[in-house]
Image (cartoon, rainbow, N blue to C red):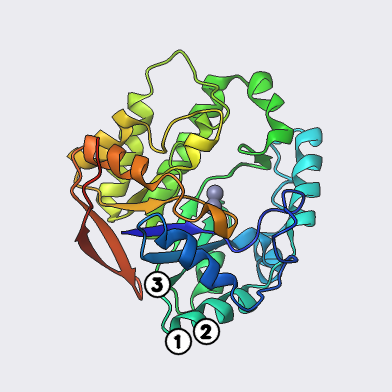
Amino acid sequence: MSDYHLHLHPHVGLGEESDPPQGVYPTGHIEAYVESAAARGVTELGFTEHLYRCVEAASVLGRFWEHPDTPDDVAALSQAMVEADLTLSLDDYVETVVRAKDAGLPVKLGLEVDFFPETIDAVGELLEPYPWDYLIGSVHWIGGWAIDASHSVFEFERRGIETAWDQYFALETQLAESGVVDVLAHVDVIKKYGLRPDTDPEDWYRQVVDAAAASGTAVEVSSQGLRNPAKEVYPAPDFLRMFRESDVPITLASDAHRSSEAAWGHDEVVRAARAAGYDTHLRFDTRRSTLVPLPVVDS
Ligand SMILES: [Zn+2]
Ligand SMILES: [Zn+2]
């Protein structure tokens, strides 16, 4: 069993005493993730650092928070967050994970790619030279609004929850259509704060599922939603069942940002996948996938 969504540093401001300084990869750092995951029965780890946190990406992504549809106060909060979080190097990150692989640790090299329709092609070119095992793609931004950041939750009320969901799923569908990434990460993270529209979400779900099936993009099943106010795995049970019915394969994910959280909630993730009808999940190697059996967990 694997955990294919892991970060090697917490976001700036969310660190704990035991975390290494930003951008530093001390000896034993990756081993700590391997040990923590192994204690939860997970034996293969895929690291997926945030692209937008890497200095090499800054010029390619540009000042994306200055989007014409983004209010100035929201843009200012996004700018402050992005600039504070710009503490990592893509080259250092890749080198660290590749070195761990070469040393025989059971790890894979991935990346969490933020989706912006305007720059996704340029991002693809930036990432081309690196030896990725897989890429995951995330909609964290509607224009310049950081939809999963607690500092900007007020924007849901201002633009309306239904409008926010509509805009979010339009972007998620575009990402799924693009085929630029191998896996859709936290595919309904728009529910993170438990703010849900009265509307039945099936039409939004359908667009994403059809796009993923057409482009051959997988979807991750993530325990992160259980740690958020949504208190529900990403994707929601109905959404995951629709992916299953369209034969879209899955990966398993915790979205941990420190070693102690590696593979957190994996039994719940496997239960959710099995409840939707899955009995396999994907592993990746140099962007080629193979299906492997899901473990059996007590229901
Ligand atoms: Zn994310
Ligand atoms: Zn993540």
- Tell me the quarter of the picture where residue 136 sits: bottom left
Q: How many marks?
A: 3
Q: Quadrant of the N terminus?
A: bottom left
In the displayed structure, 51 sits above or below 114; it is below
Q: What residue is disc 3 on?
A: 133
- Say what secondary structure mark 1 lies in: helix
Query: In this orientation, which residue lies closer to the viewer: 203 or 267?
Result: 267
Q: Say which quadrant the C terminus sits in.
A: top left
Tell me, yes or no, if residue 179 can be seen here. no
State yes or no: Cβ of the residue under disc 3 lies below 8 Å from any atom of ligand 2: no
Residue at left offset 74%, top offset 53%: 82
Residue 264: percent from left, percent from top: 46, 48
Mark 1 beta carbon near ligand 2 (under 8 Å): no
Q: Residue at position x 31%, y 48% from top?
A: 212
Dot 3: few (<14), some (14–19), or many (≥20) neighbours within 10 Å? many
Q: Position of residue 99 (x, y in %)?
A: 52, 84
Q: Is residue 45 visible?
A: yes
Q: Amino acid at mark 3?
A: Asp
Residue at the (79%, 55%) spot, across then down: 84
CB under 8 Å between callouts 1 and 2? Answer: yes
Kind of residue at disc 2:
Arg
- Residue that numbered label 2 is attached to: 99
Local secondary structure at mark 2: helix
Q: Is residue 89 left or right of residue 7?
A: right
User: In front: mark 1 or mark 3?
Assistant: 1
222 horizontally vs 255: left or right: left
Q: Earlier in the sequence, mark 3 or mark 2?
A: 2
Q: Amino acid at mark 1?
A: Asp
Residue 246 point in image, percent of width and height: 20, 42
Identify the residue at image location x=34%, y=36%: 207
- The one nearer the camera, 54 or 57, is 54
Mark 1 lies on residue = 102
